[in-house]
Image (cartoon, rainbow, N blue to C red):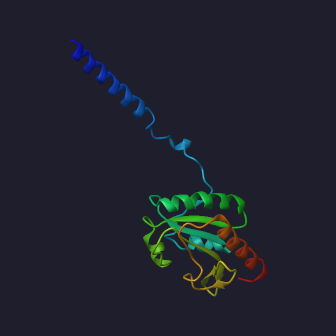
Amino acid sequence: MIAGNRIMHGFVLIVMLLAFVAAGCTTPEVNQQPQNSVQESNIKDIEQLNTLLEEEPVLIKFGSPTCPPCQDQDVILDSIADDYEGEASVIMVNINEERDAASFFRVSSIPDMSVIAGIKDDRYLFMGPDGNVSFERGSTRYVGLKDANTLRQALDNATAYRQNNTL
């Protein structure tokens, strides 16, 4: 009888523990998810990017929602997007869904970012970390987790370039 009570108490304890753990494992409703300023973009139609570039520089990040450094980068980009609202666009491209865009920009590692100052002679004009511009993305891209100051400097350079040059 004592052994039966111990088994019953153990069973009840396990059920209570499982109920407690399961209570914390609920999926938040859509409206409870945090809002961010970074646009998740579908740029299968490259014209969408070109339209943004008519108005302002674009910081474009290629990544994946399952990539931890990409997730960390998104937090940084969200802050940047808030600060540059109306001056520059910050967009994220999911390489799992937008393979053509990733291929077009020759993305090989993520997160992979570029600041595009504009379009000149029908080519993208990329802003380098040193303030120099190039038609070649390879020398101006930011691969891996980058701090906000590095990206802000590139955006500041891109906005200054647009103010001082005709695109």
- Relative vertical location of residue 36 with respect to residue 87 in this rendering, above or below: above
Q: Residue at x 66, y 83 (%)?
A: 133
Q: Is residue 105 above or below residue 12?
A: below
The answer, for residue 83, to whether it is visible in the render is yes
Name the outermost residue toward the bottom. Answer: 121
**Residue 55 seen in this snapshot:** no
- Residue 120 image offset from top left, x and y in percent: 65, 85
Would you identify the image quadrant in which residue 79 lies?
A: bottom right
Residue 16 percent coordinates (x, y) = 37, 25
**Going by the image, does 75 lie left or right of 11?**
right
Q: Quadrant of the N terminus?
A: top left
Taking depth in this image into account, of 114 and 15 the one nearest to the observer is 15
Q: Is residue 131 left or right of residue 112?
A: right
Q: Residue 7 lies in what quarter of the image?
A: top left
User: Where does residue 32 sit, x and y in percent of width and height?
Assistant: 55, 41
Q: Quadrant of the C terminus?
A: bottom right
The residue under the point 76% across, 76% down is 160
The residue drawn where x is 62% and y is 60% is 76
Going by the image, does 153 lie left or right of 94? right
Hey, which residue is sitting farthest top in the picture?
1
- Of 167 and 146, nearer the camera is 146
Residue 119, position as x, y percentages in the image: 64, 81
Residue lying furthest front in this view? 2
